[in-house]
Amino acid sequence: MVAAGSITVAVRLRPPTSWEAARLPEPAPDAPLRGDGALSAPVSRPITSQTNLRHIVQVIDDRVLTFDPEEHDPSRAFVERGFLPPGTKRYKDRRFIFDRVFRHDAMQTDVYGSTAKPLLKNLLDGYNTTLFAYGATGCGKTHTISGTEDDPGVIYLTMADLFQLIEDRSEDHIVDVQVSFLEIYNEEIRDLLTESGTSTPRGGLQIREDTNRSVKVVGLTELRPTSAAEVKQIVMLGNSRRTMSPTHANETSSRSHAVLQVHITQSPRTAAMSESRTVATLSIIDLAGIMIVCIAPTSAHFDDTHNTLLYAERATKIKTKVVTRNVVNVDRHVGQYVEAINRLNNEVEELKAKLAGKRDAEADKEKRRQRDALAEVERAKADMQTKTAQTQPSLVDGATCAGKLAAADIKLRVIRFRLGELDALASSGALSADLEAERGLLRALATPEEQVLRPDSALNARVQRSNNSGAMFEATLRAVGERKSDKLDEVSIDNVKLDARWRKAEMERVKAEARREALCEAVETQAQTVIGLLGMLGRCTVALKEASRVLRAAVESDGDTLNSTAQSMATSLQAISESNDKGFKSMVGHTTAEYLVGPPTITALDSFKAYAPTLGPRRSAAGSSLPSQGGKVSRRTSSYGSLGIGSPPRKSHRSPRKSLRSSTSGSGPYRRASETQVKGKKKGVQWRDEAGQGDLDDGGLGPASTPVISIIAPESSIVSASPVFIEASSSASAFEDPSGSAGTRNTPSRAGSESEWEDEKTEDSFSFVAGSSRAPAPTLQSSETRRRPRASHLSASFLKTRSKVAALGSLAEIDEERASPRKPGPLSDRNMNRTSSPGSSNNSSSASLKAHGSPARRGPALPKAVNAGKSGRRRSNIGPVRAERPRRRSSMIPQLSPKAKAALADNSGLADGSMLGKSGARRVTDERSPVKRPKRASLLTAATLSRPPSRLVPKAADPNISSEISFRESAKPTWR
Ligand SMILES: Nc1ncnc2c1ncn2[C@@H]1O[C@H](COP(=O)(O)OP(=O)(O)OP(=O)(O)O)[C@@H](O)[C@H]1O
């Protein structure tokens, strides 16, 4: 609702026309300004000229003007008005106040902005609006309302803004615009929009009032323009159809009143059964009425302007009533429901289409987001994969180096532990030459380990580089996992983090595997060394035993024989030592000879009792004084314990060496024949074979020098995968696993067989366990509690086993036992005393150490035994005496090599050497009972000792000749 008020009246002063301008006085430079700002007429113009015009309107401000202002200059007043009698009012000089006054230079937009524009909002809200121009002919009404093509008037400017407002409301309202244009001429209403030639008449239209009391022109053309440009064209078209007649004041003077009506119907888009519409009409009228008052500036229109102003002033006094909003509530007819429903359906479809498009857009956006996230995840994974591939070699190398360092650290700790023991002995002055050599050897072994473990060593440098790479790797994973990106959602981030964790764990696995492989490699290397040393040590033990026996036999002989034998043994022992040193050199890189310093104050023989067992079970570092790693008890066995190199005896550990010493002293875990049992006996060797059994005189040294040694493994300790099994050929130091594999030979029945003899009467045998690290410490086995298998002493087969574990035995036994082929073991190429020609018969009698249960990739196969073709029972052995049995010679007698046999035959007169048997034969052909022969051991001894000493010099200089060969070349029988 618009409150009641007055008609808004604006006055626009047009500029003078060219005709008027020609009749206005020329403005003189000295001429005073007139009230309206125009210059006064030039003085040269005739004062009495009737064509002269003057300005009669003086605009004071934007609301006040003065009509016919007074001229205070009498001369000018005389020029303008001429002579007037006194008392005559020369000027009206009347002021008018309006709502708005526009100067002659006002623009069209100025007039529109202050008059029509404020009405548009009310128009769209449903209020009728009327704008009309009033004035005399030629004062500028049409110019103001319609304007020209280049300078459009109020109609165009109003319609331009109107369509813009309709566009702004199009979301919520449906706005219908209809335009009609008519003129009133001579009381006739004429339609300005009717095309000529149509049935609709242009003139003679009737005005009717409908039921709503609204006035309508029946049959008036109504157009629906959609833009202000169309409206302008409509207005121009209508103006061109107006009735015109030139006047003296206006060559294009319109002779009619023109009325342009714009009907605006606005309805909401949300339809209902009852629709509220707003209807408004904008009437722009070019006639007296209604208004923008247009006036001319010069005295030529003096009266018209005066009257117009008077009329306009009266118009301002017109009071308007309350203007209500034109709202029409339309109750739809049933027939309109279909239209409404269709319109609503269309609207629904339109909205659905918009919604679907929005949803499709959102779906596309989601798909695009997921695609981007997936691409981002794949990119992150690819980055981690690349970094993993770049870093893995370095990390694996570092782990390998760390494993090697760990192995070196363990090795060094063990070495230092042993060195500590040796240093303690040295400080007490009890360090013998051999221990001194061991100490030097250990120091030399410690040096490379210390160098490896130095912080600036190559391995530590590689470990450091690996650690740096690892840190970079983890940093990369962390950075990728924590990568911030708008494209990554929570699931994608978790995906990337999970992949990072997996790659880190996988890298740790690879590193652990590399470290494990490095440790396994170190263990394998150590195991090979241990095996080699064990073999060498075992064979040396046998050789020493044999040397001892030969020397004892020589002591019983004459002085020359003793000297010759001593020389031979010295040479042989030297050869053994040199050969062993070569073995040490090849295995550990150093020889004991390199560390022998000067003549020893305590000889190795004197301190022999100080030796630790050479074939004892591996001792765990746990519980010992060895430092443990990381506070944990190490399960790793001292490598030197396993090596048995110079390890001191330990009370808690029984070892063969200690037992050997103990056997001498009559105490310790290894038993030997008691003094009572051996007292008065000269038999150093007890033998037995199929022919019988007997004793060999040991010259009275028996108890001390001929302990009966049986190396067995307790059945309970036997494991099928025992790490080291040592086999020997028929030489004196041969080791054998008679089972050929992790066999089951060590059964009580087998132990009690003919070949596996045992002696219930002899209690002076002792046993120890060899080979298995898991085997318990050697235990004394009592004949009262258990019948114990026993091996003969001083026999080539004196060492044997009846178990699955290591055994020492004669080649003859091996031959019989080797029904099935055995795989060569690592010891085959660790045999330091092996002959160079294993295929020869002589070579077959040399020591060939083999490990069973080890991979077959190392070393050549065991030399084929001469009696390999034979199978069946073992028919002879050396063992304790069974007094009730007749004595027979047995294969315990050492076999000579062909060369030795030939030499022996030459000396003994046995042309074919039949007494010794064929090469590799286990029996001698002499079937005489050993009883008939004075001494078994002396049988060959006598034969050989009868030879000139020069024939007995061994080839000790040959490095490939083993200790056994040395003996073979000596006057003693060659072990096979
Ligand atoms: N404000 C103005 N600025 C410039 N020229 C103007 C202006 N007003 C009017 N004119 C000119 O004056 C002349 C007369 O104007 P117009 O035809 O609009 O007068 P009118 O009042 O419509 O006359 P009629 O009543 O006879 O039709 C025209 O040539 C017009 O161009």
Image (cartoon, rainbow, N blue to C red):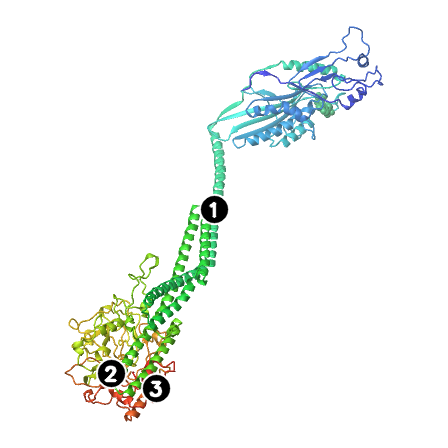
**Is residue 863 visible in the rendered structure shown here?**
no
Q: Earlier in the sequence, mark 2 or mark 1?
A: 1
Q: Nearer the viewer, residue 744 or 411?
A: 411
Q: Mark on residue 892?
A: 2
Q: Report crowding for label 1: few under 14, some 14 to 19, many 20 or more residues within 10 A (C-alpha).
A: few
Percent from the top left, x then y, of residue 940? 26, 87
The answer to which quarter of the image holds residue 59 is top right
- Secondary structure, mark 1, is loop
In the picture as drawn, the residue positioned furthest to the left comes out as 884
Q: Is mark 3 within 8 Å of ligand 1?
A: no
Q: Is residue 292 left or right of residue 489?
A: right
Residue 484 bears which disc, if any?
1
Q: Provide the residue designation for mark 3.
A: 953
The percent position of residue 893, horizontal first and vertical second, equals 25, 84
Query: Is residue 216 depicted above or below 880 in this figure?
Result: above
Distance Cα–Cα, label 2 vs label 1: 86 Å
